[in-house]
Image (spheres, rainbow, N blue to C red):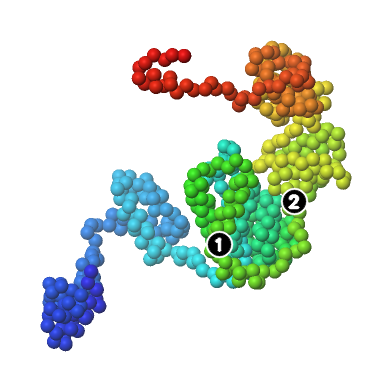
Amino acid sequence: MITDNQARKLMKYLQEKMTFGVAATKSGMDEKTARKYRDLDKLPSELLAERIRTWRTREDPFEEIWEYIKSFLDNNSGLEAKTLFEHLQRQYPGRFSDGQVRTFQRRVKNWRATEGPAREVFFPQVHKPGKLSQSDFTHMGKLGITIGGVPFDHLIYHFVLTYSNWEAGTVCFSESFESLSDGLQKALWKLGGVPEAHQTDRLSTAVNKPANPEEFTQRYQGLLSYYKLIGRKTNPASPNENGDVEQRNCRFKKAVDQALMLRDSRNFSTRKEYEIFLEGLFAQLNSNRHVRFKEELAVLRSLPAKQLSASTKLIVGVGPSSTIRVKHNVYSVHSRLIREKVTVRLYAERLEVWHGQSHIEDIPRLRGSGNHHIQYRHIIDWLVRKPGAFENYRYRSDLFPTSRFRMAYDELKGHHTVTKASKEYLLILKLAAKESESAVDDALLFLFDRNRPVTAETVEELVFSDQKQVPVTDIRISAVVLHAYDCLLSGAEVTA
């Protein structure tokens, strides 16, 4: 394509009395093209402007009603063109066809660009070493990661330094304060220092609602104060203000996806193996950030003497059903604690139950709300005394440790009344609590495999006997004689 500069050079060379062929060659044109611009005495841009159409080829079907449309756009510029077009079709039946919607959308788009309200402007920021870190939770479910073949639905707490883009992450299962505290502290201690400020979006576990006079929740402010961090938060519906970590979320998940493709498997044998995989990926991502990262390290403040406990302390009462309620979920504790007050130390993935100075037990933390975790060992003694309560017990599903326990109860109900079946099953469950759950499970498997009736007495006999159940995976396969395949292919008779 000939440029204006080439055309100007041609005219200059011709004015200097160069021969036409030399002037065309020095201008980068063939003689035919050069002759065209010499004769027209116009620049390419001028010729192009003449070819641009400035008139309409057909009548504007919306001209007569455009003021009516503008009244809607002036009142609410957020209205979509298609919504307005459908409104016009209802107001003027038969006047506008579906094929005119693109014409209408272009007209609205032109109005927005020439007469509409100003759009939000984003102002790029200059980041300085050691000044700011950002963090966010990002969901990993769509990557299809499995642990031992079971889908592993989880989140990553993602921490980023905005100057160097150094990043770290922690596996978690909810956007709780405990997950935030644990993730932030692990990131700071891995970093080896503390930046000046830390920014999150408007997490309910960290940021109070606008009506609250205090900017941050008491627990989060305590965490910030301990590390002498200045807390920052984004404005409502403004994820761009947390842009660095939001962008790193997308790139990190893309990097995980690519690494999983190279690995040729999205399954990990254990969660530890998966966490080691993530650590290696973070190290790889950070490997090209050494120069800026060194600048950050030089100005980071030192860490405190030790980490804070990443837990929340709650004092709760044990109800008559031998349960406690923590964060809208129900957990059982031993019946001896009924009507007592216990201290619960709530971590990201577990609860510690304390009575006075005694650590009673650890319980896995439930995700979400409205769930329950009932340990049959806590209540089995009283269930045996009150077997009639079992059939309609609200949390009965938690009292089947394995599928074979459920099968045993169903078989008992098939041969006995509900009361008798409940008594027998609870005796089996008590045996599992007092002796060994796995031994009782093996005994039930032994009975099912031999089609023998399930009773508490027979299960007890098997548990205390020396009879060992053959593992399901212990399969004997006869040796394959390859000669038989040769005979089969050749049509010869197979001999033993």
Q: Relative to 22, does residue 274 appear above or below in the rendering?
A: above
Work out whether residue 249 or residue 314 is closer to the camera in this orientation and state it: 249
Q: Residue at x 15, y 73 (%)?
A: 30
Q: Residue at x 80, y 22 (%)?
A: 384
Q: Which residue is mark 2?
A: 311
Q: Which mark is residue 181?
A: none
Q: Where, quadrant-wise, is the N terminus in this rendering?
A: bottom left
Q: Tell me which label, 2 or 1, sits earlier in the chain.
A: 1
Residue type, label 1: Ser
Work out whether residue 116 or residue 330 is closer to the camera in this orientation and state it: 330
Quadrant of the image occupied by residue 409: top right
Q: Position of residue 486 (x, y in %)?
A: 39, 22
Q: Position of residue 116 (x, y in %)?
A: 42, 63
| Horizontal side, residue 167 vs residue 384: left or right | left
Disc 2 crowd rating (10 Å Cα; few below 14, some 14-19, many 20+) is: many
Dot 1: what SS?
loop
Q: Residue at x 39, y 48 (%)?
A: 87
Most extreme residue toward the bottom is 16
Residue type, label 2: Ser
Work out whether residue 395 or residue 245 is closer to the camera in this orientation and state it: 245
Q: Position of residue 392 (x, y in %)?
A: 72, 24
Work out whether residue 201 or residue 398 is closer to the camera in this orientation and state it: 398
Q: Relative to 108, does residue 290 appear above or below in the rendering?
A: below
Q: Which mark is residue 287?
A: 1
Disc 1 crowd rating (10 Å Cα; few below 14, some 14-19, many 20+) is: few
* Mark 2 → mark 1, Cα distance in angstroms: 33 Å
| Horizontal side, residue 355 vs residue 421: left or right | right
Q: Residue at x 60, y 71 (%)?
A: 295
Q: Is residue 400 visible?
A: yes
Dot 2: what SS?
loop
